[in-house]
Structure formats: C-alpha cells, structure tokens
Image (spheres, rainbow, N blue to C red):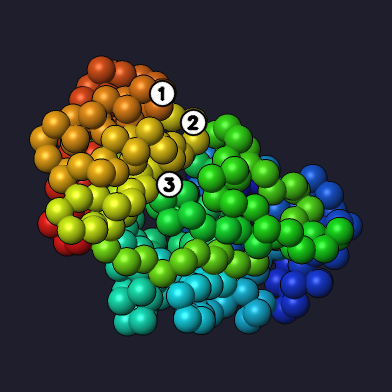
Amino acid sequence: MIPAAFDYHRPDSLQDALGLLQTHGEDARVMAGGHSLIPMMKLRMAEVPHLIDLQAITGLRGITIDGATLRLGAMVTQHEIIEHAGLSCAAPILREAALQIADPQVRYMGTIGGNVANGDPGNDMPGLMQCLGAEFTLVGPDGTRSVAARAFYEAAYMTARTDDEILTAISFPATTGGYAYEKQKRKIGDYATAAAAVLLTRKGGTCASASIAMTNLSDVPVWSEAAAQALVGTACDDTAIKAAMAAMDADIDPGEDNRGPVAFKRHVAGVILSRAISRAWSRT
Ligand code: FAD
C-alpha cells in the first residue's frame, strides 16, 4: 500500500494554500489530519500529484465561544474537541460524539474540517453538524461564503464545496436542553452501522423543540425534520418515539454492504434513534 508519487507543499498562510490550489487545479488536494486522505491515496482510490498540507496555517486552528455562538477552526482536532472544557459545557453532544470516533491515535490527528469536508457518509461529524444547525465557512478565489451543513452534502464524497475552496471554520449555536449521540458499530474503532444525533428542549412536561440527524444510512447525512416534528408537543413517550422512528425510517435510504443488509440497518437505525431520544429526554 504505497501511494503514487506526489509533491508535498506546506504553506503557512491561507492565501498561499489557495494559490497552490489555483496553480495546480485538479491535480491538487488539501490535507488536514490525513487520516481519510492518506489511506485513500495508499489504496490508490485517490491520486494527488500535489498534496497541500494545512498543518502550518495557524489561522485555521482554535475554538472560540462568543456568547451563544461557537466557532471551530477547520484544523481543530477531534482530541481538542474532547479536551475543551468550555465546548463540553456549551455543546456537550460534540464531546459525546467525538469520543465515539475511531481511537485516540486517529483523534489526535483527525480534524473537524477534514471530517465534514470529506463527504464520506460514514463520518460522524456531518450528521451532528446538521443536527446542530451548523454553518460552514468556505474561502476561495471569489471570496468567503457560508453554507449550511443541511445544504452541504450532495452525494457520497460530493459536497457544495468547489475544488478551489478551503473550509476554514464551522459555526453553530450553543445547545440547551437534552442531547445524545448514539452509535452502533461492529467493533471499537469502526465507522457507524447507524448513528443518531438528537437535541431536545422541554417546556413543562412536553418537548418544545427537537433536531434529529442520522449517519451512514444514506449517501449523505440525513437531517430528519419529520422525525423531530413527531416529538414536538409530546412527552417523548413510547408512542411518540415510535412515530419518530417511523418518520426517520421514511427519510433514510441505506444500502447493503459489509455492515449488513438493508432490513438489518433499518432495524438498527430504529433502535439507535429510540435510545438516543430516551437519553436526550432524560437529560432535559
Ligand atoms: P484528511 O484525511 O486530511 O482529509 C479528508 C478530505 O477532506 C480530503 O479530501 C481533503 O482534501 C479534505 N479536506 C480536509 N480539510 C479540508 C479543508 N479545511 N478544506 C477543504 N477540504 C478539506 N471518522 C469518523 O467520523 N468516524 C469513525 O468512526 C472513524 N473511524 C476511523 C477509523 C480509522 C482506523 C481511521 C484511519 C479513520 C477513521 N475515521 C473516522 C476518519 C477520521 O475521523 C478522519 O481523520 C477524518 O474523517 C478526516 O479528517 P482528517 O483531518 O484526517 O482529513
């Protein structure tokens, strides 16, 4: 497993990285932690004649909490997410999800930016970002733009990001209420067979708002507005949870692969969502 030959670039500014992308066009790709891209290059599923390492660009790092708005630089690692006390208070679902990604070695290198830009349906952060209502900041030759996570994913490995753009940051509101990230995987360190991100708020005895997103159950992450609506106004009892499961089931589109046949995946998705709703509700 040796990748094809490539030139290695390590710019120390965003402008230089963008310049390299422009110069080399489709022969160039940026690399963040390299824990998705390098395996793809080794397997010869990606050929990258010009590899642009983002590690030296300090402006892409850092976690900022500004009132109720959280901002993560694209190069923030999964390990940094887990360790950041302020982030764990302001949006604890992020830490719960990051702890279920791969293993500590991968999490030391893997970045939030790489995880969401990759477009792999198995990545955990895209669905979570949809659940949180996150916005992605993209910078390219034509300037800066913001794309909602819920509008970013088009197909497996296809996103709204153009080849000459770099994802610089991810922003989302601090969470209130209950949360849960529930993931079923074949073994420790594996990608999800199914995962569910759930955020709930409560007013009195009923659910006031809900957001639900599912992972690895379609070519793209699935933010299921219908599943969330099935909970609003209810006490998140068994009837409401079953209604949410049915609505979610109508929104997902899993394919058969080495994680199991379609019927099995749909069953696991329901179990996972049911557990996530119950845990999130117990935390409201
Ligand atoms: P890279 O591999 O460097 O890049 C990935 C892609 O994103 C590339 O196409 C690259 O060009 C692009 N990219 C990166 N940064 C940017 C940017 N700022 N702007 C534009 N494009 C960019 N992930 C999970 O979510 N869940 C898991 O359970 C899981 N298990 C894993 C198990 C193993 C054994 C391994 C090796 C990886 C696993 N991963 C898992 C993937 C891991 O989390 C990756 O690190 C992550 O998906 C990609 O982040 P990265 O920083 O390594 O990105």
Q: Do the residues labelled 2 and 1 touch (CB within 8 Å)?
A: yes
Secondary structure of the residue carrying tag 2 is loop
Residue 203's mark?
Answer: none
Disc 3 to disc 2, C-alpha distance? 12 Å
Image coordinates for residue 174, horizontal then vertical, percent = 41, 69
- Mark 2 neighbour density, 10 Å: few (under 14) some (14–19) many (20 or more): many
Instruction: Say which residue label 1 marks.
Output: 253
Q: Earlier in the sequence, mark 2 or mark 1?
A: 2
The answer to whether residue 35 is left or right of residue 29 is: left
Residue 105, position in %: x, y? Answer: 35, 65
Circle 3: residue type: Gly
Is the distance from the Cβ of mark 1 to the nearest ligand 1 atom less than 8 Å? no
* Residue located beneath label 2 in the image: 219
Which residue is tagged 3? 127
* Residue located 62% across and 74% down the image: 60
Residue 5 appears in view:
no
